[in-house]
Image (cartoon, rainbow, N blue to C red):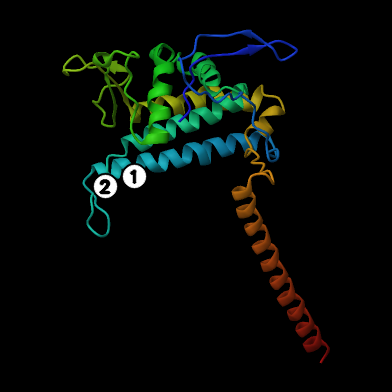
Amino acid sequence: MLRRIATLRTDAAGKLIQTEDLDPESRFVISVDTKPQSAYAMESREKVAEWVNNCVLGDIRTLHYGIKSADRGLTSSDGRRFGGGNFLLASACCSAMEYVAWIRFGEADAVTNIRRYCAAYLNSIDTRYGKFIELIWRSFRNGLVHGWWPQCPRLRGEPATRFRMGVGISADDLHLEIDPNLERPSFSINASRFFADFERSVDEGFLPWVLRESDDGVLERAAPALLEISAADRVGFRQFDEIRKTYESGRKRLMGRSAQGSESDTSNSCG
């Protein structure tokens, strides 16, 4: 997992003009924030709004409904119990928020988009989002999406400062709060309330902006991103080529059967 440790800036000639101290005797990989290229553009702003409301939020509503059903004591057909769904709901909200924030602001850096989304739409619902969004994103989003646990923050080099990050789901679980009752400092979000606030921010802020104020750039940002595979990427290219050749072979067989069927139909009709 990549961890941001410093920012390096260059001048017009590509020379470093700003550096920060780095860890000694370490190896680093330099990357750059780039905006993803869209595979195509969506048809209209109405289609973007429909996609976000019915598909993006619709999927999370389905998940939330399943969580509430499981909470009523239902079990699977083979008798195995359901989980709480709290981690999955929280990570789904984070992923969806990253997507709509990208559509809205279009910055290459996802965290910048999230900060701006909070300032525009979530702070009016609960100011604590803006107060804690950096830690929420780095702990809950990055931890849950990549490792199925929220990452536990601590100050570097100070193990005793580590504290817990929790995700609740029930109506009375804490949200954006510190629990003083535990032996170790902790910070919790409530996945159900997180979804309710996020959905409200989309309904009241994001979707009206898409339909009334956005420019044509949203049609590309809302569409799937393009994944370009280089011939130098031997594994990726081989797998891509296998899919392409299998598709082409299948199409040829299908077209051959269609042609035979057409000839058969013609002969019968003439007879």
Q: Amino acid at mark 2?
A: Phe
Give residue 116's mark. none
Residue 105, percent from left and from top = 61, 21
Query: Mark 2 = which residue?
Result: 82
In the rendered structure, the answer to whether residue 192 lies left or right of residue 29 reads: left
Residue 179, percent from left and from top = 22, 17
Where, by quadrant of the figure, is residue 262 drawn? bottom right
Q: Secondary structure at mark 1?
A: helix
Where, by quadrant of the figure, is residue 63 drawn? top left
Q: Amino acid at mark 1?
A: Gly
Where, by quadrant of the figure, is residue 123 drawn? top left
Q: Quadrant of the N terminus?
A: top left
Query: Mark 1 = which residue?
Result: 66
Q: Are marks 2 and 1 in contact (CB under 8 Å)?
A: yes
Q: Quadrant of the C terminus?
A: bottom right
- Residue 125, placed above or below residue 99: above
Is residue 195 at least partly visible in the picture?
Answer: no
Residue 115, percent from left and from top = 51, 16
Residue 198, percent from left and from top = 44, 26
Q: Residue at x 52, y 36 (%)?
A: 53
Q: Residue at x 63, y 48 (%)?
A: 234
Q: Secondary structure at mark 2?
A: loop
Tell me how far mark 2 sits from mark 1, CA to CA. 10 Å
